[in-house]
Amino acid sequence: MAFVFPIEPRCVTGLSCLVATEAARLVDWADIVAALSFEALKGQTDAFDEAVLALKPQAGLIAVGRRLRALLAGSAIAAHFRGHRTQDALSLRAIPQVHGATRDQIAHARRQIETELGSATDNPLVVGTPDAYRVISNAHPHGQSLAMAADLTALAVAELGSIAERRIDRLLNPATSGLPAFLVSRPGVNSGLMIVQYVAASLAAENRRLGQPAVADNFVTSAQQEDHLSLATPAALKALQAIANAWRILAIEYLCAAQAIEFLPDLALGRGTGIARRMLRAAVPALEQDRFLSPDIALVEMRMRAPGWLETIEAGLDPPGSAG
């Protein structure tokens, strides 16, 4: 029997698995929170029409469009404001295109990580049979594929945070939302959610830096024997930080979108967005006057990342996660 050994458990492989797992949950929440913002900003659902999206058959785009239609199904708010404007800003209209592209890149990165999990990554390696084997020096420990996967994920996640921050800005700006400034009923004496948009902008700015590739850098080590480094571990750590920042941005958008709904007509939300708003309101009261918001943001982020809320929303869709 032929054999190849060993398969080395590596720090970067473990970190990359965390990157893939966190990113998968993040993109599902991004669709939910964006749908709630879309509703609060009186978005025009024609942009998510199945026939229109099918004309650009990117897998991620089609999947996000299907999820948005499911999340917004039955929305009396969307029906009430249909025709309110000819078209929406791109941060609303292009949710399938932007979120979908992120999904596609994360799926590609995940394939690289899964391949690495089934690979021998040590040097030297022994190949052959017990009676006829060779010990071969090789470069399998080089983490180029993982480094590129992590860098790609960081960039894709940074874009999720970037477009979410633009939606937050639109929610808080009365010129674009048609709602009270900073989403508080008495904006003259309250700053409302103004400061949390600063936080989101700062996190999005940091993610733009984290989106720069680590793999393109290089150093020489081991007396020039190792003269091309992937920097895969720093790339994975960078991706995890970008994901953490994106979680915080989405938690802020979630709070802002739910607050914006407070000022809309008393009409039913979509099937999925209605569940999302009810769960948030059960944990965090609406903002009536200024209060310390850091605990609210931390609580919402924790609930988003933990099992429970996401699964409840997905279970409420018919069929789960999709619509015609």
Image (spheres, rainbow, N blue to C red):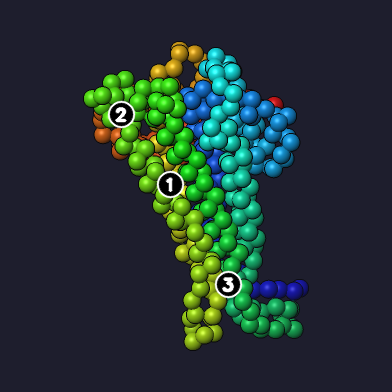
Give the vertical position of 172 relative to 149 (above or below): above
Q: Quadrant of the N terminus?
A: bottom right
Q: What is the tally of numbered marks visible in this picture?
A: 3
Give the vertical position of 230 relative to 238 (above or below): below
Q: CA distance from mark 1 to mark 3?
A: 31 Å
> Percent x, y for residue 204?
43, 47
Give the vertical position of 283 relative to 238 (above or below): above
Label 1 crowd (10 A; few <14 / some 14-19 / many >=20): many
Mark identifier at residue 192: 2
Q: Earlier in the sequence, mark 2 or mark 1?
A: 2
Mark identifier at residue 204: 1
Q: Quadrant of residue 293?
A: top left
Q: Earlier in the sequence, mark 1 or mark 3?
A: 3
Instruction: Evaluate if marks 1 and 3 touch, with contact meaning CB atoms under 8 Å apart.
Output: no
Write down the residue under mark 3: 142
Mark identifier at residue 35: none
Label 3: state its secondary structure: loop
Q: Quadrant of residue 181?
A: top left
> Percent x, y for residue 194?
33, 33
Q: Is residue 258 at all visible to an observer of this figure?
A: no
> Percent x, y for residue 45?
60, 25
Q: In the image, is 193 to the left or to the right of 49?
A: left
Q: Residue furthest left?
A: 189
Label 1: state its secondary structure: helix
